[in-house]
Amino acid sequence: MQYRRLGRTGLQVSEIGFGGEWLERHDEAHSVELMRYAHSKGINIVDCWMPDPKSRDIIGKAMQGCRDSWYVQGHIGSTYQNGQYVRSRDLQFVRPAFEDLLRRFQSDYVDLGMIHYIDSMEDWDNAMHGAYIDYVRELHEKGVIRHIGLSTHNPLIGKLAVQTGFIEMILFSINPAFDMRPATEDLDSMFGAYDAHFSGIDPDRAELYRMCEAQDVGITVMKGFFGGRLFRTEQSPFGVAFTPAQLIHYALTRPGAASILCGYDTKEQVDEALSYETATDAQKDYASVLASAPLHAYSGQCTYCGHCKPCPVDIDIAMVNKLYDLAAAQTTVPQSVAQHYRALEHTASECIGCRGCESRCPFGVGVADRMTKTADLFGF
């Protein structure tokens, strides 16, 4: 298992995580054993947005004896009212729901206290002013939540979260299909029909990823498999099917992404996700699938897939392109990005303009021209 730093939280999280949403589908013993199996394979981060007692009890029992080796995303504002999930900012529901989470986890803290599920500007304004955010800050000051996070499907909300300065990480929905969608306050629309004119990553999403990388705000990924639709040709908006390894690699190659939280019903599904760790470059290759898809190819956009390798002068072209995109999005080059660029063994100025990489790029990116622009931007 590979581990990645989750932004400025400093937590070293497994790049394959555990999304707990499906735990309640099965009997308790099965789900407890499933979580313990995943942990034995190196998975150390779990998300619990679910307010129902069964899911929370399962996670608590699975962590018994090893709580300190799990990183938990516990959501503040996910409440259980009359046997139903209700998203709320009302402390008469929020406080007891969070206290219930701690009690069922048999823990006095949560590693990542998540401002739960904000997709609309109205909800953002409600959450960020008044008793709800005061409660979140109080929990943080007391150490009951070690770090403050936020979950959203809307890149505009994600960008606001990054700009707060106190939100250290976000849980965001990332997959090739969602990345084509413009910002919306309606999650259901993300699962609707895709129009043929969509092509490439939506600018707001690309900007969010760049902001997260530049501001050291970590990303954990939800909905990486588009509810399983991207596994089936007939349901995929691209008209082609992807494998788990390809979708995991797509998510983990977004700037700022640290871990993808997959849902599991069986140990076999855990093993399938973890096979990413030993997969070949060819098995991880999402770019060829996108480029050859009958619909919605990402023409002209670098997706940092690495197909441009090898370079005769050993430039890490995908990383140089990523750092260029991060820097070019700012009025001045951020010092953190400049430091990463200086640390590269070979920089863009060493490009000999052979354009061999361009013949291998699935998306027709003018790599040599980008190398010239990068050298000009960074000064070497």
Image: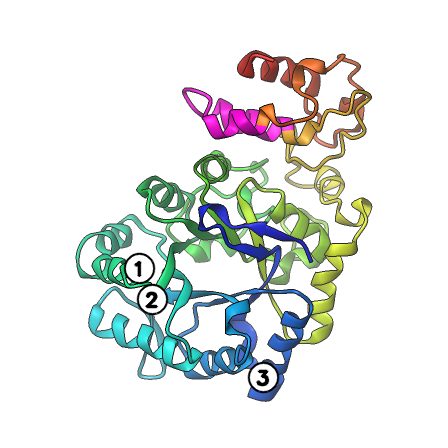
Quick one: SS at disc 2? loop
Q: Disc 1 and disc 2: Cα gap in Å?
A: 6 Å
Would you say 286 lies left or right of 280 here? left
Name the residue beneath numbered marker 1.
140
For the residues bearing labels 1 and 2, Cβ distance under 8 angstroms: yes
Color theme of the render: rainbow
- Above/below status of 263 relative to 319: below
Depth order, front residue of 29/243: 29
Q: Disc 3 and disc 1: Cα gap in Å?
A: 33 Å
Q: Quadrant of the C terminus?
A: top right
Mark 3 vs mark 2, foreground winner is 2
> Within 10 angstroms of label 1, few (less than 14), some, or many (20 or more) residues?
some
Quick one: SS at disc 3? loop
- Above/below status of 123 relative to 45: above
Type of residue at label 3? His
Q: Residue at x 31, y 59 (%)?
A: 140
Name the residue beneath numbered marker 2.
144
x and y percentages locating residue 238 in the rendered image: 66, 46
Magenta extent? 320-340
Asked if residue 25 shows in the view, the reply is: yes
For the residues bearing labels 3 and 1, Cβ distance under 8 angstroms: no
Q: Residue at x 81, y 49 (%)?
A: 280
- Check the image and name the residue furthest to the left: 130
Q: Which mark is residue 85?
A: none
Type of residue at label 1? His
Type of residue at label 2? Val
Asked if residue 116 shows in the view, the reply is: no
Depth order, front residue of 209/13: 13
